[in-house]
Amino acid sequence: MKSYRDLIEQTFEFPQKEFKVRDHELLFNDVPLMDIVKQYGTPLKLTYLPRISENIRYVQATFQNALEKTKYNGTYTYCYCTKSSHFSFVMEEALKNKNVHMETSSSFDIPIVRSLYNKGKVTKDTYVLCNGFKRPLYMQYITELLNDGFKNCIPILDNLYEMDHYEAGVNVPYKVGIRVAADEEPNFEFYTSRLGIRYSDINSYYKEKIEKSEKAELKLLHFFINTGIKDTAYYWSELSRFIFKYCELKKICPTLDSIDIGGGFPIKTSLTFQYDYKYMIEQIVENIKWICDKNNVPVPHIYTEFGSYTVGESGAVLYQIINEKLQNDKELWYMIDGSFITHLPDTWGMSQKYILLALNKWDDPYHKVNIGGLTCDSQDYYNSEAHTGEVFLPMRNDEEQLYVGFFHTGAYQESLGGYGGIQHCLIPAPKHVLIDRNEDGEITTSLFATEQSSESMMKLLGYA
């Protein structure tokens, strides 16, 4: 019978950049995962910090090359979309790279900005693009940043009334952006995004509100579509429409000189993943330049706000297979020492697939399985991969426990799962380990958080 190693190597091009096998065990970015398991146990979340910087530097270099190749007379700025992961270790790893800035979406992002400033991780020149529909506290915090000299804090106006708050409270000259309400994908339930200002209202709003202001100037036009940056007719059509609107507005607004094309680069969630980042970046730059040249308008500076792309591929969740159950003639269940609903909520809420690989027993025979979580919910399972409707893992035996890992899980899972709170069936948040490399390239690990305790849950529930 073929081994699990044979299955993977015959199904995919393997090994790959992030994944290799040594002595029957899996390496993730050259980190021996079984060593991590032996030191910290499971269930376990880990973050491989160097991958964050690798992805940032790759996109920065690729955009810069595209600007030079097309003789684009503008700059590129990388912003990190904080809602993908607000953890301090993520923010600090991203911001230690040159020319990395921030995009926020909540009032509670602003105290994070303050904390990072106090630690010297950002300056008052750092761009803080404030997105989202803003309630009073969010607008108050933005106003305070502007009055305190954060001159590149730019509220992205989401409705026709938001600027009234800044006009009343901001005491210094300030810049604003406008988010345009893009059309949703044709198969979506709604025609136009609920976020942003309608295309037909933008010019008149600028004339009536922003142009007449003695303090505000329009700096940036913002664009985002939920499907992300894909080589589809829908994406290119919406981007082109947006750039034509920029050109139209630029002719009546001399201060407008920048666009934010949002985020949306996909991440690798399957060993079959293919995406030509270089091609897409070059095509974006070429399209912007072509439309601006056609309209005799100077090209804008380009901002992006990548979130999942920044942090997603740094994350993994490791489990032990603690039991197996044959529930009928053909349905074999592997039970993990955790829960998909609580630890990886996207697998439950969005049927998201991640890269699933065994951590050990690569030279053992394999079979088809379903993987079950610990909650009492029938939806707490994982039984298909992105490339096939089945899951195959090595067979268990009494000689060696089987461990598995889900990879590139670093974006959104903690916030969606309610990190540190109360989760389904009171499944605790697992311990979290940070993996880094020192100046000599040696692997270092540190425990960021222990497994959530019953005492913390009792306190949240009012029993203590």
Image (spheres, helix red, strand yellow):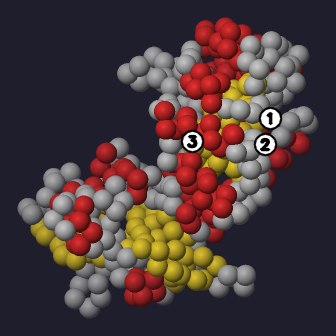
Left or right: where 448 falls relative to 41? right
Residue at 32% x, 66% y: name it.
429
Do tag 2 and tag 1 residues touch (Cβ < 8 Å)? yes
Q: Amino acid at mark 3?
A: Tyr
Q: Is residue 181 above or below residue 46?
A: above
- Residue 90 location in percent, x, y? 57, 62
Residue at 65% x, 24% y: name it.
167
Q: Earlier in the sequence, mark 1 or mark 3?
A: 3
Q: Quadrant of the C terminus?
A: bottom left
Q: Earlier in the sequence, mark 2 or mark 3?
A: 2
Q: Earlier in the sequence, mark 2 or mark 1?
A: 2
Marks 2/1: CA distance? 6 Å
Q: Quadrant of the N terminus?
A: bottom left
Element carrying mark 2? strand
Q: Amino acid at mark 2?
A: Tyr
**Which residue is disc 2 drawn over?**
76
**Which residue is disc 1 drawn over?**
301
